[in-house]
Amino acid sequence: MALPATHLRDPVVPIMTPLDRLPLRVRPARPLDDDALFEFCRSNPDLRIERAAGGDLIIMAPTGSETGRRNFALTGQLAAWVAKDGTGVGFDSSTGFVLPNGAERSPDAAWVPRPRWDALSTAERGKFAPLCPDFVAELSSPSDGLADLEAKMEEYARNGARLGWLIDPVERTVHVYRSGMAPVTLRDPATVDGGDVLPGFRLDLASIW
């Protein structure tokens, strides 16, 4: 599906699409650059929008209440560790990052070491930061396809993520991704450990299941 020409001339035009038709994958007739994409996302705050490496836009419905509860539990635990550890910066699901391959992604939770974050300019930090986080987590929801999420996790790993967690509450599994290694699946774990990327962080999954 191609975006109408009006979206390309004026990327701040809101999307008028029924929620029951989402998610949608659309290909603009002319790719949106990073600044235009940022404004496009700002004009559609009720939607989740990502950009694939090839320029396609993935337009997703807002988070449901149960998924939002789980996201809150995930982000809250990470935030508490970040505040105690002090070596990096944490991010929630509303944060977009432009990966080295050109994709723009918004993981459900992410972490970046402080030196990498501080190396960005004020302008870069104010929009979609041009980097791949060292740690990313994705929490699957009823509207997500597992194969799509697995492909996204592999993309994070190829673009520099040192640790990634794909959490599936329905199957009660956590797929652990590390750069240069095959993913490992943990079945019904009580916790998952941050290892050498997030030393001392252990996610308690009781509040997420």
Image (cartoon, rainbow, N blue to C red):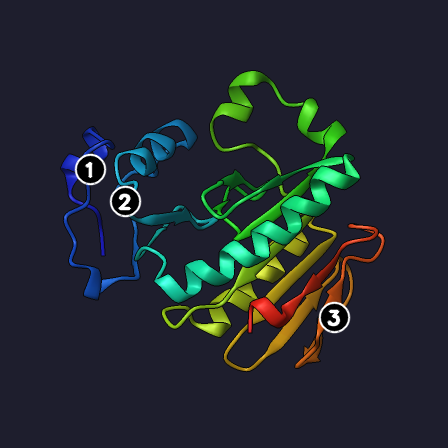
The residue identified by callout 3 is 182
Q: Amino acid at mark 3?
A: Ala
Residue 168 x, y percent position in the rendering: 54, 73
Of the numbered discs 3 and 2, the one sitting upstream in the chain is 2
Of the numbered discs 1 and 3, the one sitting upstream in the chain is 1
**Disc 2 and disc 1 in contact, CB within 8 angstroms:** yes
Q: Using residue 134 as the reference point, say whether residue 20 is left or right of it.
A: left
The residue identified by callout 2 is 28
Q: Nearer the viewer, mark 2 or mark 1?
A: 1
Q: Residue at x 50, y 73 (%)?
A: 147
Q: Residue at x 55, y 32 (%)?
A: 129
Residue 137 x, y percent position in the rendering: 60, 57
Estimate the spatial distance between the alpha carbons at disc 2 and disc 1, rounded to whole Å.
8 Å
Residue 177, quarter of picture: bottom right
Residue 201, quarter of picture: bottom right
Estimate the spatial distance between the alpha carbons at disc 3 and disc 2, rounded to whole Å.
34 Å
The residue identified by callout 1 is 7
